[in-house]
Image (tube, rainbow, N blue to C red):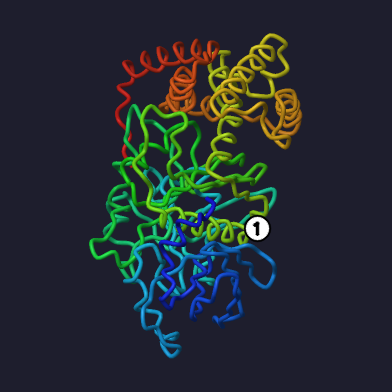
Amino acid sequence: MALTKACLNNALPKPMNYFLFHLGFKKVFGGIRPQEGGRWKGRCRRTILSAQIFDGFYLSRDPNGISAAYCFARLPRLRSRDLAKVDWLNKFDPFIPGGMASEVRILIVGTGAVGAFYGSRLHRPEEGVKVSFVCRSNYEEVKANGIEIVSRTFGKYTMQPADVFKSIDQAAQLGPSESGSRWDFVILCTKVLPDRVDDAVLLSPLLRVANDHDRPPPTLVLIQNGIGFEDNHRQRHPQVPILSAVTVVNAEQLKPNLVRHNRWTRISIGPYLNFSSYLAHPHPPINPQLGIHSQSQLELLVSLLRSGQIHDVEIYGEKDLQILRWHKLAINASMNPTSILSGGLPSSEMVKNPQLRLHLQGCMQEVFEAAKKIFGIESFPANFASIERILQSTEKAGESSTIKPSMLVDWELGRPLEIQAIMGFPIRIATRAGVKLARIQSMYAFLNQLQLARSKKTGLCQARI
């Protein structure tokens, strides 16, 4: 999210004194706004930061040369001796985190392999970063014994969460237990099943905005597969900062509280504000402060992940993150359904079969062409893998381990499939853009029928968290 002149002109009336907040690291310093092009400095807790003001715009770097996101609070009649009184600053701006807050509280909803792995890397209670989980089927095991991670990258270790909750309602009522304050981040790592459960409604107890606006709402982070599901959250929670994340991590849940991390850690994150390029309806206008706060929370989350040794975490802009989603969709929408329809073949076996390899190439090409039309681009960025490179890396990965697509694992375990987010939504979005996903459409029809037949036999019911 680029900070525009309009955003900061509205936030910085010239006659006012003000505090300049480094939202990512909760640092603060104050002074009188200089003339345009002027410079001012202020001492914060550990170091001196500086900011350059260009006619209401900003350019800022910390002493190490790292760009940072800042927000400006309107504070009339501020005096230098008030610098120590940071506890009352919240009331001036609903999007400023709680002053010099010493803790970051994170709630992860969906304690499968992905949620458990990233939660274990974020959790550093000795540094004030506390991670809690909402567990469903594995509540008793995680509550009693924590989560054990076996990783080729990080070794074997056990994480003891700050709290473990049976449900979202319980997490909203009880946590964080010591203060009753809201969560800073709510990270959703569940399957996207809009035909069975409305995630935006389920998360509402966690994302309510306080009437007195004494704190911002939690930032919602969506680490999920598929396309177009973020819009439901934005419509339901217009004041909530939303971050959308794409990951390539390969991990599996071996037991209720045991996760094996096989390979890769990369996660790409970007804001989701008012992106309606491929939606059937426009979003309402977004408060500029929401964009500023979303960017600051994005940078905070990235810094926390890097501190947890996830060094390949990436920051994307809103549109670029959606382009990346379509690139990953080319893999998911081809290999996931094909693995089921081919009788349960893992990815590496499919790419070795000449006919299936040709089919996978055709599916990926369909998605690539649709993305180009939707986003108005000639090609994906040069650093994105080509179709042939994807197939080659899949074949090579199969030499050391058998990797089953997640949809195949769900099918074998009798779980509902992410058909809508991975196939249904993209088909509808592509159709509105005048593009046909013929191969994906055919597999979508077959899988829908297979799942319907299984549901009638097993009585598969609506999922609840």
Residue topped by disc 1: 309
Q: Quadrant of residue 195?
A: top left
Q: How many marks?
A: 1
Q: Is residue 55 above or below residue 337?
A: below
Which residue corresponds to the image point at 49% horizontal and 16% vertical from the top-left? 434
Q: Is residue 66 above or below residue 113?
A: below
In percent of width and height, residue 148 lies at 55, 53
Which residue corresponds to the image point at 36% horizontal and 61% vertical from the top-left? 216
Q: Is residue 316 left or right of residue 202?
A: right
In percent of width and height, residue 153 lies at 69, 51
Using the image as rendered, state which of residue 341 and residue 206 is in the foreground: 206
Using the image as rendered, state which of residue 456 and residue 26 is in the foreground: 26
Which image quarter holds the C terminus? top left
Residue kind at label 1, given as amino acid type: Gln
Q: Is residue 210 left or right of residue 445?
A: left
Q: Is residue 307 left or right of residue 421?
A: right
In percent of width and height, residue 50 lies at 61, 74
In percent of width and height, residue 390 lies at 70, 27
Secondary structure beneath label 1: loop
